[in-house]
Amino acid sequence: MRAREITKCFDDVVALDGVDFDVAPGEVHGLAGPNGAGKTTLLGLLLSLAVADEGRLEILGSPVGRALAAPAGVAGFVDGPGLYPSLTARQNLVALAALRGRDRHSTRIGDVLDEVGLADVADDRVRGFSLGMRQRLGLAAALLTEPRLLVLDEPANGLDPAGKKHVHGVLGRLAAGGTAVVLSSHRMDDLEALCSDVTILATGRVVFSGPLGKLSTENAELDYRLRTADPVAARALVAGAAGVRLVEDADVFVVRARVPALDGLVLRLGADGIAVRELAPVVSPLEAAFLALTEQPEAGR
């Protein structure tokens, strides 16, 4: 999937302003940004719920025209899945397969319900489902067509830890099989757990796009929790380490550094026989970058 110079306006609001966006087969690509950044608009373009005013959009090797119809091989949902509350989970998927005119998908209904962990409630009415169960049913509906590009808006919304782990496993298996996945989320931990690459939007513009690992090298200094086997000896090394500052002095330190300086400190600790028992960012690199890159006035999406 490739987008170049995508622009989309609603009345006098610029929702997307010259956006470039690439997703390779088998890649799980995260989309992040504050409210009003343009995430929902971009996802809608990928699902052909709207068309761009300017720019070029290519999906699954074919240019996207002006027709509001998702290309074959594309599935997903924006602003939550559309479901019939009076029908059961199974009946929702049967109805969806019929609406698409693809009865062959009906043979997969049992499989996709099982895949998303809803086989036991397949014949329960959706009106009694929790938000997380509805999200999983929306994912099942998208999986019916065996998509090559899957577009999801907040897929982990409302999921408990077990449900989140289940959905993460489904998305990981899809990507391993060559499906490109684009997902939007406000939860940085979900993006870090699932995504190899991420695009951050702010006021309709791309402020970062690339591998997650690149954020930690490009971002400013981060604070890290550091716990060692010998706090006294470690404190002395921290005090003398170039590019490292001691922010909080206790048995578990908080040090501030860029990644290269932190690596140097860890090597020095190891060389002096001081075991590192914990080293973790106080705020994740993705969250820190998100905050640093999006601190600007919001605009309508």
Image (spheres, grey):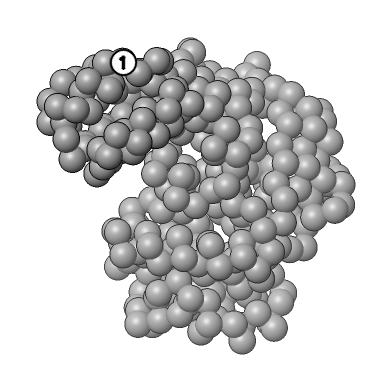
Q: Amino acid at mark 1?
A: Gly
Question: Quick check: can you spot residue 300?
Answer: no
Can you name the residue that lies furthest to the bottom here? 107
In front of the other: 160 or 50 = 160
> Which image quarter: residue 13?
top right
Residue 14 location, x and y as percent?
65, 20
With respect to residue 126, does 253 lie above or below?
above
Determine which quarter of the picture holds residue 42: top right
Q: Is residue 182 left or right of residue 72?
A: left
* Identity of the residue furthest to the front in this view: 272
Quarter of the image for residue 7 reads: top right
Seen at 80% across and 32% down, the residue is 4
Q: Where's residue 179, x and y in %? A: 67, 62
Q: Dot 1 surroundings within 10 Å: few (below 14), some, or many (20 or more)?
A: few
Find numbered disc 1 in the image and state the secondary structure of the residue it sits on. Answer: helix
Q: Position of residue 215 (x, y in %)?
A: 53, 30
Q: Position of residue 286 (x, y in %)?
A: 46, 33
Residue at image x 36%, y 30%? 268
Instruction: In this rendered view, identify the residue nearer to me: 262 or 102.
Output: 262
Point 62% across, 65% down: residue = 176
In this rendering, is residue 65 above or below 207? below
In the depicted structure, whether residue 202 falls above or below residue 72 = above
* Direction from residue 242 to residue 279 in the image, left or right: left
Q: Is the residue 147 above or below the residue 260 in the image? A: below
- Dot 1 corresponds to which residue? 240
Q: Quadrant of the C terminus?
A: top right
In the picture as drawn, the residue positioned furthest to the top comes out as 297
Q: Nearer the viewer, residue 87 or 52?
A: 52
